[in-house]
Amino acid sequence: MAETALTERTDDVRAAVRARLGLSEKHLLVLAPRGLGTVYRHDEVRHAFTAAHAARPELRLIEIDTTVGHAGRAVVHRTDETLTLPRQPHDDLLDLFAAADAVISVPRADQRSTTVLEAIASGVPVLLNDLPVYRELADDGASVTLLAEPLVESLTHALTSPGTVGVRVGANRDWARMKEDRHALFDEIVQLCTGAIRH
């Protein structure tokens, strides 16, 4: 798991993912990878995205409907501004991080999510609501954007501000590698996913 998550995806992977989704390098891809519905405040994400898109028409929102299996359709639903994808295999999700220009995770409550940790490790900008567990990540050295309440307002601001969306965070890859060397970050990921501790 650690090695897979820390394997840097190439520009070819980024281009291939975008081509498969019918998107180009001119688009700024905002990925909401953790499912639709109220627990992840997705209505608020969509409201913020709609407001931001009016100011930055190159933005595209990629949602993942975790209730829909991956077999069959690559895209569940498409509009001019959004794509809804089915649940993604792990490697495909990591490829999406490589293709994305920002990742959003704004649940009402959370533990240290594998998805969030892997997004941080990928170097994509990660936008999180201001929960204690996410503040701990920031205090621990991860470079993330914490979104204050009201969420729609702060997320709209983050999506439209220069220097956030599309700016890779190389320091986060270094942070994840340091954590891996200390057998901390990805031990937590492995425990979350399998209940096992790496030796």
Image: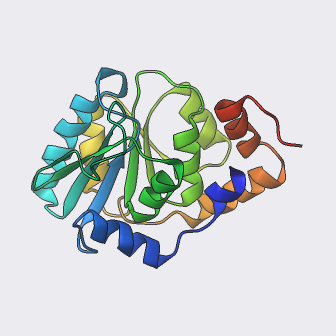
Number of marks: 0
Asked if residue 123 is positioned above or below residue 141 in the image, the reply reads: below
Q: Quadrant of the C terminus?
A: top right
What's the image's color scheme? Answer: rainbow
Residue positioned 37% across, 65% down in the render: 166
Image position, residue 173 (x, y; %): 63, 61
Splitting the image into 4 quarters, where does residue 108 fall? Answer: top left
Lateral position of residue 167 relative to residue 155, left or right: right
Q: Nearer the viewer, residue 161 or 41?
A: 41
Splitting the image into 4 quarters, where does residue 38 fall? Answer: top left
Lateral position of residue 96 relative to residue 198, left or right: left
Lateral position of residue 106 relative to residue 91, left or right: left
Q: Is residue 60 visible?
A: yes
Image position, residue 143 (x, y; %): 56, 52
Q: Is residue 143 visible?
A: no
Residue positioned 24% across, 51% down in the render: 75
Please identify the residue farthest to the right as the structure is shown: 199
Residue positioned 13% across, 57% down in the render: 55
Lateral position of residue 50 relative to residue 147, left or right: left
Image position, residue 119 (x, y; %): 52, 50
Please identify the residue farthest to the front as the structure is shown: 72
Asked if residue 27 is positioned above or below residue 138 in the image, the reply reads: below
Image position, residue 51 (x, y; %): 14, 45
Asked if residue 104 is positioned above or below residue 165 in the image, the reply reads: above
Residue positioned 58% across, 39% down in the render: 114
Q: Nearer the viewer, residue 151 or 9?
A: 9
